[in-house]
Amino acid sequence: MKTNLSGAITTTLTTLKHLPPHTTKPRVPEQTCLTLLQSSTTLSSLTQIHALILKLGLHNNPLVLTKFASTSSNFNAIHYASQFLFPSDQNTPLPNPIYYDAFLFNTVIRAYAQTVDSKSTALHFYKTMLRYGVVPNKFTYPFVLKACAGIADLNLGQLVHGFVVKLGFEDCLHVQNTMVHMYCYCEGGDGYARKVFDESPKSDSITWSAMIGGYARLGRSAEAVGLFREMQVAGVRPDEITMVSVLSACTDLGALELGKWLESYVERKEITKSLELCNALIDMFAKCGDVDKAMKLFRRMSTRTIVSWTSVIDGLAMHGRGLEAVSLFDEMVERGVTPDDVAFIGVLSACSHSGLVDKGHYYFNSMQKSFGIVPKIEHHGCMVDLLSRAGLVREALEFVRKMPIEPNQIIWRSIITACHARGELKLGESISKELIKSEPMHESNYVLLSNIYAKLLRWEKKTKVREMMDMKGMKKIPGSTMIELNNEMYEFVAGDKSHNQYKEIYEMVEEMGKKIKRAGYVPTTSQVLLDIDEEDKEDALHKHSEKLAIAFALLKTKPGTPIRIVKNLRVCEDCHCATKFISKVYDREIVVRDRNRFHHFKNGLCSCGDFW
DNA sequence: CTAGGGTTAG
């Protein structure tokens, strides 16, 4: 292709040169160039064609420039072309406006809409289009709406929506689907997205995917799954992209049964297992508690990208299987896959969750040295967390002091947590106070300080913290636990009495409490935020959402069935201890997904080794 | 010349 093109260009130039002057019609070079552009498809020919354009003096011919930009579909080409098409310099004469049609503008808008960080430029050219009096066509709007989505500007999106209606393109599926997508990306636009979705006279798998994907990204996972069910009722066949969105919602819910069902659905319906779909499946299994299954799928993949490797490394890390995660990372590098910054977050967090201090240092240092990746705040955060969890609070502080980046609140919170765990209470108290000063509306800063006072048995100070929160009108984020049983998700919050079987559940909690106490469980009351007397504190602990969910599972499942629950916050010390006893007394495997990681409780022990 | 998707410290 490349050699053919060179040949064609040489021939063209030679022919043009040897034509007698009187036979050279003005349009000959233009036509020749257009024909050449028509037949060239490779990007490598870009520079050659560019040279030709310059040689023939066609650098300000709109037709040629547009064709040049669109054929090469290269960002540099469109950038180059738009310089001449829309000169910013007032003195440069505009090329003949006759050539400025919708196609030309679409080409320019598309190029910018598809490029990261150029969405506003795309919209700038859309405005230019309107200013030139060129009427957009149905191909224009998907590009424009995508650009609106990129900058997440709801007002602009609505304005464009108005134009779409005025020009009568709202019935075009492509336009309508991008509209759903655009609204889902704009803050507060989800209601409008749903309106377009509900009112659409026609819809296909792409319409459904846009809406399901939108809900999934907004964290409205249950609604995403619900919509997927409606899609099946509506008789629309989901494709692999729909499945990726549903799977990501399922991953968020931690619904393993649903995930398994989705996998079998993919098989049954013979949905193409694209690379992205395989990655989504791996991520789902890992984050829903079955890393071994994730690993199996990963090993069976014929092509893997850095995302596949990272998903499974993260999965192992979350389950506290740090050594396996680390060796998989090494295997990846040996196989010639270059890690990116995200992969490093994975391997560093694996070291952190498993206490692999030396390895953590090794990978952190190798980032820049071997791969030229400058550590970001997240990587520094991983290191601080690694040192903190390992009990090396002073080293963690020293690391923060030497960091080339300003530490953020997340980093300080890791250190405070470590101070709490290691009994460095005075230090924890002073850092907490500073943190509250700098970030007074962040609820967890108060919880950390309050926990420290509880450990110091300074109840009066603890009450003060509580009062500070009340004064600022802040409320503690309620802990909630989800559990999937018989294809349903149940959610419990502390002290919840909304469940219709709540009486039986509370009786079960009582029974659990008695049985584990007999087995040697001693309640840890210092973590209760409320300032109440000891007996009530113990009672409040009983009503923690995970205990309700576990009681419910014990009531509803056959003996010996593993119990899987998902918590929205980190599991508290008392629940962690109680769950160990429950796993032993009731002879159940209990798998808990925390805000941070997994805990596998079995026979009185937890896979985290009480290190979390 | 047109649409929807995947991994990210605590």
Image: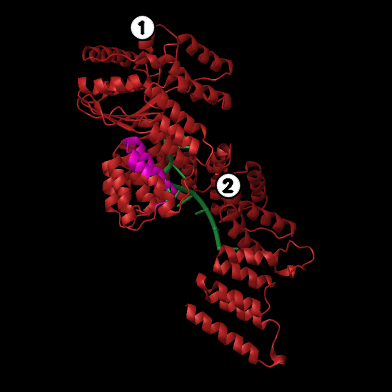
Tell me the subunit letter for badge 1: A
| Residue A29 drawn above or below residue B2 | below
Name the amino acid, label 2: Ala
Q: In the image, which is nearer the foreground, mark 2 or mark 1?
A: 1
The magenta segment is: A339-361
Number of other residues with Cα within 10 Å of mark 1, as a class: few under 14, some 14 to 19, many 20 or more: few
> Magenta region, mostly helix, strand or loop?
helix
Judging by colour alone, the chain drawn in red in this rendered image is A
Colour green, chain: B
Q: Position of residue A115 (x, y in %)?
A: 56, 56
Quadrant (top left, top right, bottom left, bottom right) of the C terminus of chain A: top left
Circle 2/circle 1 CB separation < 8 Å: no
Of A172 and A591, the residue lying toward us:
A591
**Label 1: which residue?**
A535
Q: Residue at x 61, y 85 (%)?
A: A13
User: Is residue A583 part of the magenta span, yes or no?
Assistant: no
Q: Tell whether position A346 is magenta.
A: yes
The outermost residue toward the right is: A91
Q: Residue at x 26, y 47 (%)?
A: A296
Residue displayed at 58% across by 38% down: A187
> Mark 2 vs mark 1: which is more N-terminal?
2
From where the camera sits, is residue A204 visible? no
Q: Position of residue A34 (x, y in %)?
A: 60, 76
Q: Residue drawn 77% across and 68% down? A: A93
Residue assigned mark 2: A149
